[in-house]
Amino acid sequence: MKKALITGITGQDASYLAEFLLTKGYKVFGTTRRSSTVNNERIEHIQDKITILQGDLLDQGSLSSALLESEPDEVYNLAAQSFVQTSWNQPVLTGEFTALGVTRLLEAIRTVNPKIKFYQASSSEMFGKVTETPQKETTRFHPRSPYGVAKVYGHYITMNYRESFGIFACSGMMFNHESPRRGLEFVTRKISHAVARISLKKQEHLELGALEPKRDWGFAGDYVEAMWLMLQQEKADDYVVAMGENHSVREFLDLAFKTVGISDWSKYVVSNKTSHMRPAEVDYLIGDASKAKKVLGWKPKTSFKELVEMMVKADLVLEKK
Ligand code: NAP
């Protein structure tokens, strides 16, 4: 039986990855950091099938202990301060978690067992002010937020441990991926949640920033399979994972409101173009996942429309409870 350790097990991606690895027959371990309240909602349904260990990206000893205890074949580093906006308010902490945290974990692997295979959650935010469209593995990085900068560091240190110590370390340069388990602060979930509440007359308005920005949005459940596939190859490498199409916030709104039978949503949405502006904006990101498709045989199964409908329907169920 293969064993996997996932950092940030309480997060969106980790919950889908844990489900996926359980179906593959893995013994799954996940790390959480200490908090005064339990926040296991995303993994409640599988909690009796996985083992939770303590592990904080700020505390190297806790990472080594988690490795010694779980003796994993594969480690998936999904823990991070993952919200771009927060990275401007807490740039140092973001660097500690999202950048140096990767080095702490790689160091723990190098000293405990360098044969462990490692996956790093890199991000399309590394491309930021894009130099070519669509973005692929060779596209130059130009991050536009402390989060993006920290992810570039995490990406290069992963590459460096592969080249310096021969660790089987891979990065998935993942474009945005959403789900009903996405945090409420992210625009997609903010929309699906508000649309469900508006249709149930529990909320009157939804306030958003500009509606024109476009993102390449996919379904998190599809993307975790690519993480696993990367660690099953002969050779460690880095891959872009994306849908290869981008959609505006306006299109997301359109589909979300259509799901609850509302075609004219103008009276429900207040768009304040300046209130949600980032100090430095990223361009319209769109990924070219041809390498992942060709080498890994990865293919997304969920369309943009299906994703939006899935999120709104899940929030309807949640809000009716
Ligand atoms: P998420 O839902 O925000 O989950 C992040 C996880 O990291 C949470 O479990 C969080 O724990 C944990 N964490 C934060 N700080 C930590 C620390 N100091 N020590 C240990 N754990 C810590 O993020 P996600 O959407 O699943 O994303 C997973 C990874 O992929 C992240 O690294 C993210 O940056 C990256 N990524 C995501 C996307 C996307 O579109 N979703 C795209 C590209 C890359 P708490 O529950 O205690 O806060």
Image (cartoon, rainbow, N blue to C red):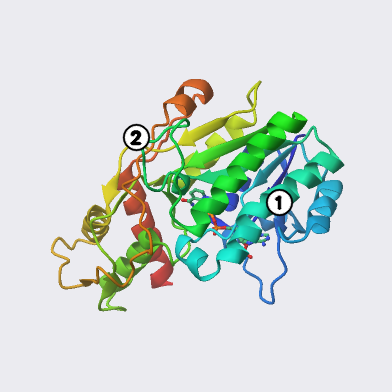
The local secondary structure at tag 1 comes to: helix
User: Contact, CB < 8 Å: mark 2 with mark 1?
Assistant: no
* Front-lying residue, 14 or 279: 279
Residue under the point 78% across and 41% down? 72
Determine which quarter of the picture holds residue 97.
Answer: bottom right
* Front-lying residue, 81 or 319: 81
Q: Please, is residue 90 above or below residue 227 in the view?
A: below
Ligand 1 closer than 8 Å to label 1 CB: no
The local secondary structure at tag 2 comes to: loop
Question: Which residue has dot 1 on it?
Answer: 49
The Cα–Cα distance between marks 2 and 1, rounded to whole angstroms, is 40 Å
Position of the C terminus, as image quadrant, is bottom left
Tell me where residue 26 appears, x and y as whole percent: 71, 39
Question: Which residue has dot 2 on it?
Answer: 134
Q: Please, is residue 78 above or below residue 257 in the view?
A: above
Name the residue type under label 1.
Lys
- Single out the residue that lies furthest toward the left: 264
Name the residue type under label 2.
Pro
